[in-house]
Image (spheres, helix red, strand yellow):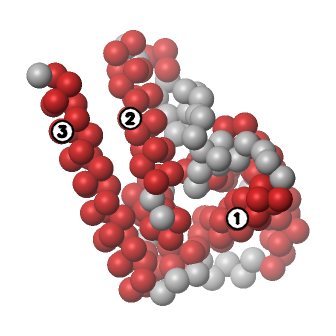
Amino acid sequence: MYEENFAFVWRSARRLGVSDSALEDIAQEVFLVVHRRLPAFEGKSCIKPWLFGIVLRVVRDARRSLRRKPANLGGHARATTNLDSVADACSLSPHDSVAEAEAVRMLHAFLDAMPESRRQVFILAELEQMGVADIAAAVGANVNTVYSRLRAARAEFDRAVTRARASDQWRIR
């Protein structure tokens, strides 16, 4: 379970705004919860929506505890290392490596600014390629709500990309 799903848990927590310095603790907590609750998993759906639900609860609980004591869970200071990247860093040219790092930085900035309900749906649909029924199960919403949130998130993403392109065009001139 751990080996097959660690990367998914890590990516999901990071995309939900957990800082690099807190990711290890969050992932460990998720798998502790999985260990305790695995016998109760009914198998009605895939394991990833169930895991994502656990990641959501662990991240929310961590944020609640942060309100009581300061720590570094916020997603504003991000390192350039990235588990999202599947390409071998050695195979990229320096230009491609910088471009990829900038794209990842922009994606995380976009996700950090997005409302939580839309962020969850966008991550699962666009980045994890989950189906709407599985997303609905993961976030505890009905299918129509998921479609509505996804439509709004995609529109927001399109606007962000348009702004970024316009900004790049302005810098070139």
Residue type at tag 3: Ala
- Numbered tag placed on residue 166 in the rendering: 3
Give the camera-side residue of 132 and 2.
132
Give the left or right position of residue 53, taking residue 104 as reference: right
At x 63% / y 52%, what residue is drawn? 13
Residue type at tag 1: Arg
- Numbered tag placed on residue 103 in the rendering: 2
| SS for callout 1 | helix
Q: Tell me the mark number nearer the camera, choosing from 1 and 3.
A: 3
Whether residue 3 is visible here, answered yes or no, is no
At x 58% / y 34%, what residue is drawn? 78
Task: In the rendered view, tell whether residue 6 sits above or below residue 140.
Answer: above
| SS for callout 3 | helix
- Numbered tag placed on residue 60 in the rendering: 1
Few, some or many residues within 10 Å of mark 1 (<14, 14–19, 20+):
few
Give the left or right position of residue 158, taking residue 136 as reference: left
Q: Position of residue 142 (x, y in %)?
A: 48, 87
Whether residue 17 is visible here, answered yes or no, is yes
- Numbered tag placed on residue 121 in the rendering: none
Q: Quadrant of the N terminus?
A: bottom right
Q: Report how far apart the C-alphas of labels 1 and 3 lie in the structure.
A: 35 Å
Give the camera-side residue of 30 and 168.
168
Task: In the rendered view, tell whether residue 62 sits above or below residue 28.
Answer: below
Pointer 2 or 1: first along the chain: 1
